[in-house]
Amino acid sequence: MSIELPDGTEAKLRELAAKQGRELRAVVEEAIRQYLEVVAITDVDATDIAETQAAMLGELPRPVGWKAADS
């Protein structure tokens, strides 16, 4: 597989590889792996987030005098 990167990104990867004394291929593979891990964690449906937040709100203690907007 071949991937074309913007010149600035390629330069940063090459600089990082040189600073770390690692092969460019290893640095690129690690960068892509880390990116995919982050995307997998953050690739969630907005509906799931809203449902989770609503469920959690019901579990929180309410301060004295606090009134929910929907009450």
Image: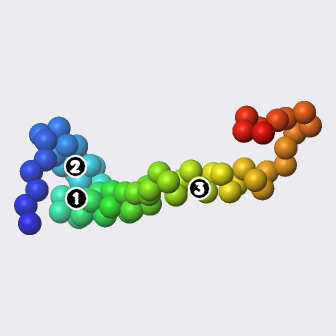
N-terminal-most mark, 3 or 2:
2
Locate residue 21, reporting x and y percent.
25, 57
Q: Nearer the viewer, residue 18 or 37?
A: 37
Q: Tell me if mark 1 has few (under 14), some (14-19) or many (20+) residues whose alpha carbon lies within 10 angstroms of its own.
A: some
Q: Which residue is rendered at x = 47% and y = 51% of the image?
A: 46
Q: Are marks 1 and 2 in contact (CB under 8 Å)?
A: yes
Type of the residue with mark 1: Val
Q: Nearer the viewer, residue 11 or 20?
A: 11
Q: Is residue 63 above or below residue 23?
A: above
* Mark count: 3
Element under disc 2:
helix
Locate residue 34, reporting x and y percent.
35, 60
* Residue position for label 1: 28
Residue 51's mark?
Answer: 3
Please tell me in which quadrant of the rendered image residue 37 appears: bottom left
Q: Tell me if mark 2 has few (under 14), some (14-19) or many (20+) residues whose alpha carbon lies within 10 angstroms of its own.
A: some
Q: Is residue 25 above or below residue 70?
A: below
Q: Nearer the viewer, residue 70 or 23?
A: 70
Q: Is residue 56 above or below residue 29?
A: above
Q: Is residue 71 above or below residue 13?
A: above
Please tell me in which quadrant of the rendered image residue 66 appears: top right
Locate residue 35, reporting x and y percent.
33, 57
The quarter in which the N terminus is drawn is bottom left
Of the two numbered discs 1 and 3 in the rendering, the one whose residue sits closer to the viewer = 3
Type of the residue with mark 3: Glu
